[in-house]
Image: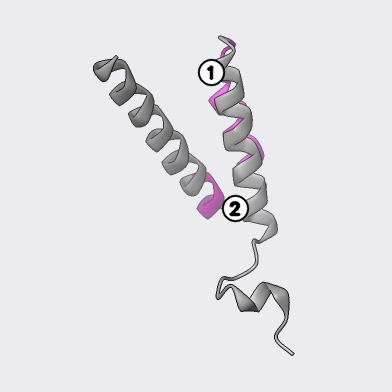
Amino acid sequence: MIERHQSAGRDELTEQDLAIATLAGRYVERRETGQPPCAHDLLAIAAEFGNTAVDNLRTVLACYEAMRAGDDLTS
């Protein structure tokens, strides 16, 4: 019998993946509600998972900001 997580052909999310997703969600929530995003605090939390986590979070946040900027140009 094939296990459920393998049937989709994808790896399971790691603790680091979940942390980055959570931190990115906090950033987006803060930006969308007009609060300061406090990226430095979120990056400090990501640093607990290592430099790769920090780099990955920076990439996700940069992509989010680029999408926001693109939305502003088309609105």
* Image coords of residue 68 (percent x, y): 38, 24
Quadrant location of the N terminus? bottom right
Q: Where on the picture, by quarter, is residue 24?
A: top right
* Image coords of residue 64 (percent x, y): 42, 32
Quadrant location of the C terminus? top left
> Up-down: is 54 above or below 26?
below
- Residue at figure coordinates x 51%, y 42% from the top left: 57
> Up-down: is 53 above or below 75?
below
Pointers 2 and 1 in contact (C-beta within 8 Å): no
* Image coords of residue 38 (percent x, y): 58, 21
For label 2, the residue is 50
Q: Amino acid type of disc 2?
A: Gly
> Is residue 49 something one can see in this rendering?
no
Q: Is residue 37 magenta?
A: yes
Q: In the rendered structure, which segment of residues is drawn in magenta?
A: 35-54
Q: Nearer the viewer, mark 2 or mark 1?
A: 1
> Up-down: is 45 above or below 10?
above
Q: Nearer the viewer, residue 52 or 62?
A: 62
- Residue at figure coordinates x 61%, y 23% from the top left: 29
Q: Main secondary structure of the magenta part?
A: helix
Q: Give the colour scheme of this rendering.
A: one colour
